[in-house]
Amino acid sequence: MTTKLIDGKNVAEKVYRELESDIRILKAANIQPGLAVVVVGENPASLTYVRNKAARCEALGLSSFKTELPVETKEEELLALIENLNNDPAVHGILVQSPLPPHICEDRIIRAIDPSKDVDGFHPVNVAKLALGDPTGFVPCTPLSCQRLLVEAGVQISGAHVAIIGRSMIVGKSLALLLMQKGREANATVTVLHSGSHDIAKISRQADVVVAAMGRARYIGVEHIGEGAVVIDVGINRVSDSSHPKGWRLVGDVDFDAVRDRCSAITPVPGGVGPMTIAMLMQNTVTAALRASGISMNP
Ligand code: GUN
């Protein structure tokens, strides 16, 4: 079978080109969309993510407000920073990079963010809006990325059986809510598989689309994938590899080499879902600025 490689970098570039006209409209009204990104501690992956996000803001002409705080930052200090960002009219989107140090309650932090600036889509108000099918909220960036990649790959989501492996709030649960909604780019039959499921492979093999999002390196093998299925790999795992200069490389939750000939289309890692998540973050930030400005007649 000829397997199509779904190129996340290409799709992300398309999203950036699409955003240009909205950014121009906002600029004409003297509004520069602004994203505040906050990271606490020295987690190298988190520091790289937030710097990439800030760099992309600059490339698009968005303002970015990056705050890197020491690991010993108190929860009250972070809450005070969020309060300031909530009240700052130049800030349209706020993202607090996860994970936070263990002495800070992530739920409290998320709940402190103004839902209208919650471009991560993690605040309970936005989760509820997604569940209700209310388009005035924000949908988390990784589920949005998966949906957009399927659309761009020409996959008919409506009526398809989508098996999502992993039930995190950030990916699995939110993606299930998104794809089961009524709508042209949704309307799927969704199965969510997780650590409590009996015989995951038996069920995922029946699916037209398999989304791997459980955070276990190369866990999904050929036994999980039906002939001709589409595979979206959300996993980003470091595995040691002495042949690489850094001593490690990134792999997904899917054993790519084992399954690629069995599926009709698949996202690579890196270069699949990863580049798309920043694109969706930029899209949510521009949407937040349009809503705040009152320019947007759309939700
Ligand atoms: N850490 C890993 N992914 C994410 C994300 O999408 N948002 C935030 N805030 N932190 C993350």
Image (spheres, helix red, strand yellow):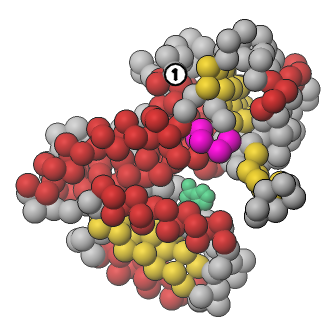
Q: Height in image: 217 above or below 156?
A: below
Drawn side of residue 97 relative to residue 291, left or right: right
Circle 1 sits on which residue? 153
Q: Give, as a three-letter code, the residue at label 1.
A: Ala
Give coordinates of residue 141: x percent, y percent: 50, 47
Secondary structure found at label 1? loop
Drawn side of residue 280 relative to residue 293, left or right: right
Q: Height in image: 224 above or below 280?
A: above
Q: Does residue 125 appear anywhere in the picture? A: no
- The 10 Å Cα crowd at callout 1, few under 14, some 14 to 19, many 20 or more, is some
Drawn side of residue 130 relative to residue 270, left or right: left
The one nearer the camera, 148 or 11, is: 11
Classify the position of the N terminus by image quarter. top right
Q: How many marks?
A: 1
> Is 271 part of what is drawn in magenta?
yes
Residue 129: quadrant of the picture: top left
Classify the position of the C terminus by image quarter. top left
Q: Residue at x 49, y 17 (%)?
A: 154
Q: Does residue 65 appear anywhere in the picture? A: yes
Which segment is the magenta one? 269-273
Q: Height in image: 35 above or below 149?
A: below
Q: Residue at x 55, y 33 (%)?
A: 7
Give coordinates of residue 63: x percent, y percent: 29, 67
Give coordinates of residue 219: x percent, y percent: 86, 38
> Is 74 part of what is drawn in magenta?
no
Q: Height in image: 19 above or below 1?
A: below
Q: Residue at x 8, y 55 (%)?
A: 28
Q: Quadrant of ligand 1?
A: bottom right
Residue 213: quadrant of the picture: top right
| Residue at far right of view | 199
Magenta portion: prevailing SS class: loop
Give coordinates of residue 242: x percent, y percent: 87, 58
